[in-house]
């Protein structure tokens, strides 16, 4: 028998239902009722005229033969051998109303298939089959139930093939059981209410408790870590969280296998870890529970999983330390932080550099924090991997790495491209302008001072009157990107010869 586990503010309730057997659906509708509760099996048609014959037949669960329970014609009703004392047609004027429904108060053994057969004489007979399921509920232990105690609502549906699921919900002492019929039924579900009394002056005592081996582990922040529960299938699971380095516990997760009901947290003031989830929802539907947590730094601590099966409780705890590293930069240094939670199980924490010869110091400004400083600009050998290692008392070690990289090198030849290219162009442009000006000045001087035509136009006087540089000065200066020319008159046609800057002037 499978067990339903139902939590409520005062106590825990268990519900069981007989397993549903697979069967071919040879019915038109399903009706579920409690034993000794009046039920009506519907059968209707349009009002009839003339001769009509009506038969209600019954085939109990597990049998192949039909038995007559009631028959009627336009004059009267006739009871068959399988009829019940209170069985009758719902409407005695069935011929004129077209209502051929059957009404009676079934016992637990009255489940099965009921066939409504309407014989219209020359016309074809019409048949409708209804599968009737009887729900029985036994309550234990005797009421009232002590607070935080265990209540069993033991149910039995006969025939079990009529339903696919039964679930109950508690509301102020009343349990409403919802029965879902198999496919093919016109109704989606049937509801039945049971009132349960609880004695809050008494507290239940669970004497059957199994504690699993506690797990001590550590992980990097936002990386998956498993939270295991018992391997025994259960009906209900509770997950509690004891925050890092604290004693109080909060319930952060509840899962009801039978109602498919999930609750995060006990109230709105408790923040459930955001990255907590069922590891295998499909397995949870069959009672096997486990979780996956991707914790932030402050979400370490102790996670206690409790699985309930009947009166037995299975408990399993996982203690988690979370490690996180990050950096903060100032103009003069880079501060590397190493933070960790659940310090009670931590043996030691340290910083290390990939280059063992590099001198590295660290300090702690508060519990759970360890810092090391890297001066800026980076000194030789300061770049590389900085590792914060955390060791638990069990010997387990985890590491978090922060990589410090030097800034990219600057190529001097490419540092000012916008400035270099215009200056290079300007170096070529200045001599060309000078040539044009020199030609004009030479023509003017040739007409005015003809006898001094052999004087070099590159000559420097005390007052610099010439726009040209002295070739001797240029020969003593390293070559640049600019090109300079020395011009001399050769004849009356004013033809100039271009000289290389290192070529001797033949004048």
Image (cartoon, helix red, strand yellow):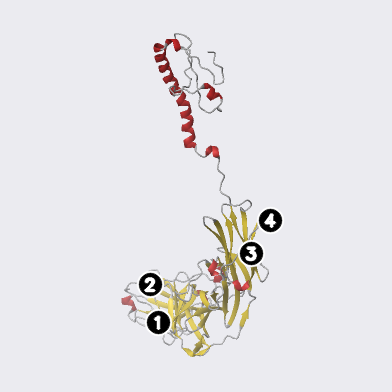
Helix, strand or loop at label 3? It is strand
What residue did someone put label 2 on? 121
Alpha carbon distance from label 1 to label 2: 25 Å
Count neighbours of disc 4 (C-alpha within 10 A) and say few if under 14, some if 14 to 19, many if 20 or more: few
Return the disc, 4 or 2, that comes first in the chain's sequence: 2
| Residue matched to label 1 | 103
C-alpha distance separating marks 3 and 1: 81 Å
**Left or right position of 340 against 50:** right
> Tag 2's secondary structure?
loop
Q: Are marks 2 and 3 in contact (CB under 8 Å)?
A: no
Which mark sits nearer the N-terminus, 1 or 2?
1
Query: What is the spatial separation of the Cα atoms under label 3 and label 4, in whole angstroms?
Result: 16 Å
Residue 357 image label: 4
First-in-chain label (3 vs 4): 3
User: What is the secondary structure assignment of the residue under circle 4?
Assistant: loop
Q: Is residue 408 above or below residue 259?
A: above
- Mark before the other along the chain sequence, 4 or 1: 1
């Amino acid at each position: 028998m499978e067990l339903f586990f139902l939590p409520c503010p005062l106590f825990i309730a268990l519900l069981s239902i007989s397993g549903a057997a697979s069967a071919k659906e040879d019915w038109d509708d399903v009706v579920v009722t409690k034993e000794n509760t009046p039920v009506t099996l519907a059968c209707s048609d349009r009002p009839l005229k003339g001769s009509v014959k009506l038969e209600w037949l019954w085939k109990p669960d597990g049998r192949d033969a039909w038995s007559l329970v009631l028959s009627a014609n336009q004059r009267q009703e006739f009871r068959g051998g399988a009829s019940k004392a209170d069985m009758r047609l719902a409407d005695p004027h069935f011929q004129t109303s077209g209502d051929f429904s059957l009404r009676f108060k079934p016992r637990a053994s009255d489940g099965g298939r009921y066939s409504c057969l309407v014989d219209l004489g020359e016309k074809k007979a019409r048949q409708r089959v209804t599968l009737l399921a009887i729900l029985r509920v036994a309550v234990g232990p005797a009421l009232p139930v002590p607070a935080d105690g265990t209540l069993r609502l033991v149910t039995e549906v006969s025939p079990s093939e009529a339903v696919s699921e039964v679930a109950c919900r508690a509301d102020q002492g009343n349990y409403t059981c919802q029965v879902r019929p198999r496919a093919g039924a016109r109704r989606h579900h049937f509801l039945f209410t049971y009132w349960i009394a609880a004695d809050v002056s008494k507290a239940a005592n669970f004497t059957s408790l199994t504690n699993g081996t506690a797990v001590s582990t550590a992980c990097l922040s936002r990386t998956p870590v498993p939270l295991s529960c018992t391997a025994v299938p259960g009906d209900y699971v509770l997950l509690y969280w004891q925050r890092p380095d604290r004693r109080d516990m909060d319930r952060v997760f509840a899962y009801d296998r039978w109602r498919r009901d999930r609750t995060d947290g006990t109230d709105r003031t408790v923040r459930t870890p955001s990255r907590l989830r069922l590891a295998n929802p499909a397995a949870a539907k069959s009672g096997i529970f486990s979780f996956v947590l991707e914790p932030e730094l402050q979400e370490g601590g102790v996670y206690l999983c409790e699985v309930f099966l009947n009166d037995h409780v299975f408990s399993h705890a996982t203690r988690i330390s979370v490690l996180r590293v990050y950096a903060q930069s100032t103009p003069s240094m880079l501060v590397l932080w190493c933070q960790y939670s659940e310090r009670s199980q931590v043996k030691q924490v340290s910083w290390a550099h990939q280059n063992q010869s590099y001198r590295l110091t660290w300090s702690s400004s508060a519990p759970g924090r360890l810092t090391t400083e890297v001066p800026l600009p980076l000194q030789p050998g300061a770049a590389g991997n900085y590792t914060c290692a955390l060791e638990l008392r069990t010997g387990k070690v985890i590491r978090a790495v922060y990589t410090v990289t030097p800034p990219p090198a600057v190529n001097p030849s490419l540092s000012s491209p916008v400035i270099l290219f215009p200056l290079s162009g300007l170096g070529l442009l200045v001599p060309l302008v000078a040539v044009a000006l020199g030609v004009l000045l030479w023509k003017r001087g040739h007409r005015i001072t003809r006898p001094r035509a052999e004087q070099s136009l590159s000559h420097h006087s005390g007052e610099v009157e010439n726009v040209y540089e002295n070739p001797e000065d240029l020969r003593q200066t390293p070559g640049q990107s600019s090109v300079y020319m020395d011009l001399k008159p050769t004849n009356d046609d004013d033809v100039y010869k271009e000289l290389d800057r290192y070529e001797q002037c033949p004048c």
